Amino acid sequence: MLSIPDTYPIDLAPFKSDLKMPYTLTPGRAAGVFLAEIGRRRIVGSRFRKSGTVVVPAQDFCPLSGDADFEFVQAPETGVLHGFTETDAGLIGLIRIDGSDIDFPHRMLDAAYGDLAVGMRVRVAWAEGVEQSILAIAGFRPAANAPVGRVVPLTDPAKPVEVVPYQLTLHYEHAFGPYYGRLFDEIKTNRRIMGVRSPGGEGAMIPPREICDITHKPTGTWVELGQTGTVRAMSIIYLEFIGQKQPPPYIYAEIMLDGASTRLIHNIAGLDMSKAKELVKPGTRVRAVWRETRTGSLDDISHFEVIEGE
Amino acid sequence: MTTHVGIVGVGQTHHARRRTDVSQAGLVREAVDRALNDAKLTIDDIDSIVVATGPVLFAAVNQPEKWVVDAIGGSLKPVVRVTSGGGTGLVGALAAYYQIAGGLADRVLVVGYDKLSEGALQYSISTLYDPFWGREFAVGIMGFSAAYWRARMDLLGHTEEAAAMVAVKNRRNAMANPYAHVKKEVTVEEVLKSKPLAWPIKVLDVPPISDGAAAIVLSSERMAAKSTDRPAWIRGMGYFCEADNAPSRSMLLSEPLAIAARRIYRAAGITNPRRQFDVVEVQEPYTCFELSYYESLGLCAPGQAAALISSGATQLDGDIPVNPSGGCAGANPIGAAGLVRVIEAAAQVMGKAAGNQIRGAKLALAQSGGGWANLRGIAVLSA
């Protein structure tokens, strides 16, 4: 058998990972009323009683003092441009609604960058059919002659919107680096699970790494680990949750591969799940079962199966 | 250490499965108002603020301290955010403790919170796994925790029955806690028969998912008298970590917690924790953790946790009551949970526990932790 060469870096394209997280956000009372009223084409602000500070869009707490004692006001549809920038998504302006003491960002419409000037008068452009969103305002248009509006007490406020559905989609590209690069390249091309020898010489670490976590000494040469191992710990997953990769029930397992000093997390399958508690325990011997497909990830191992009679 | 530090005011929200009437900022405000009121102070008296929250993926707001600072009234004051998963609340208190003990501030406000109803909890927690190495198999920390509980059963005798007794005790204690939102007594049999989520963890081994906030005011000795004549003095506080996948790691007990106990006990003069502490508050993400903590905290020898819970020693009327508040079983707003443990322990030695006051409690232990097993800390508080 050929000896395994010492460490060498393997460049792999970054590992792409997407997180798609659903949310149900709670705007709270002030923003909740703002969102409820915006569909009725009323712009709501809060006026803090102690200082008289007016905040549009409405907020629960005064940004100057933290004061929470406020009354709702209806703000006019006009204001002043206090700053602007051009982005890929168009012109973004910092708008101060007449009567408000703070600026907020929104789109500038029907204008070119060169048309904009700090201090310019602007007026709301309403979007059609949008409710419960700041985008019920499509943006603001230049309105040179718009008279200065005033805030007035809000009559008959709507009930606050309590829940706003939201989604965060995050794209990541994780660099493999030379150690993970070699590990996953070996998994993909040679179906070998490679670790690096611990500086003390006892067992190999997977995933392989440059420095030992305990001794902080450089790790040693690469070694191929067994494709068999011993279950260290296991649980049987019945829980369903968002982002889950497989339907329950299934077995979550932490496995010490033969020759390894660190653990590998994977699933154990290929058995009668109704007897899982008896068939899989700490100490149970298992073997890796490879998939046909080669992606260069831990998922190339379909699962671990129990080795009968060991 | 040159300056003694005391907890002079505490406050928490009435925790709930879902608060639709307040935003995260509103939740923070409620706890802050209660803590300041309890300390007879206003935000103007506060030198520095620590905001403690769980991972931002819990609630989709990055740098939330920037948002909630208005709700705290902390504009133009020193504000930092700290985070450490489940240990966030204790770490927030620790960050405040360092500031006062180091002589850099006299009064520091700490507020911890999470609004867990807003996001996908297990999915968010699964992102603490290495994206290359294990994340695709992660089940929050539940799959992991259940797996090592299963391993502890064989070696340390942490049986399902013993863990069920923890559930029975904590849920009963939560009945008297006005801030808890799960108030339902259960029996050992009901716990054992409850639906498995990540066997051996069953639904009644698991705390609720909560919206909630908690706040404390820490003060130097010099300034404490304005707030109270009975502060909860911090005799020691620390937080320790271990590598994530280091070689030959047993995972059967939390080494960082054992180290924290050893170091902080020495600093606080604790030689016999079971005899010296009057009351203990631990953050038990699942019932099996409380058993493990008994051993790591030195309340009993390794392998004796099941015997300790069975003996009744950790019940309200036992010699070492653990979680008279009900612990996480009553409410579990993760970013606040560690701070709630500190609050409950402090309230005991201040003689003003809202629920089950342990009579004459003079010395209390609070424990909290984050990550899965690799971040753990404690605080020792005295009258």
Image (cartoon, rainbow, N blue to C red):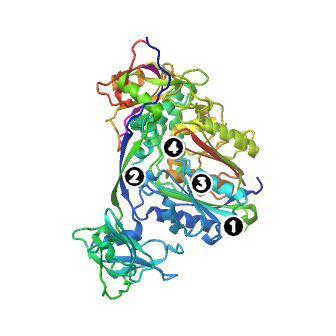
Q: Which residue is mark 4?
A: B285
Nearest to the eye among marks 1 and 2: give it: 2
Tell me the kind of residue under disc 2. Gly
Q: CA distance from mark 3 to mark 1?
A: 21 Å
Left of A97 or right of it: where is B268? right
Report whether mark 4 lies on the same chain as mark 2. Answer: yes
Which stretch is magenta?
A: A227-241
SS type, badge 4? loop
Q: Does the magenta portion include A142? A: no
Seen in the picture, residue B21 relative to A293 is either above or below; the reply is below
Q: CA distance from mark 4 to mark 2?
A: 18 Å
- Given the current orientation, which residue lies at the most extreme front position? A114
Tell me the kind of residue under disc 3. Gly
Nearest to the eye among marks 3 and 4: give it: 3
Q: Which residue is mark 2?
A: B119
Q: Is residue B193 visible?
A: no
SS type, badge 3? helix
Q: Which residue is mark 3?
A: B92
Nearest to the eye among marks 3 and 1: give it: 3
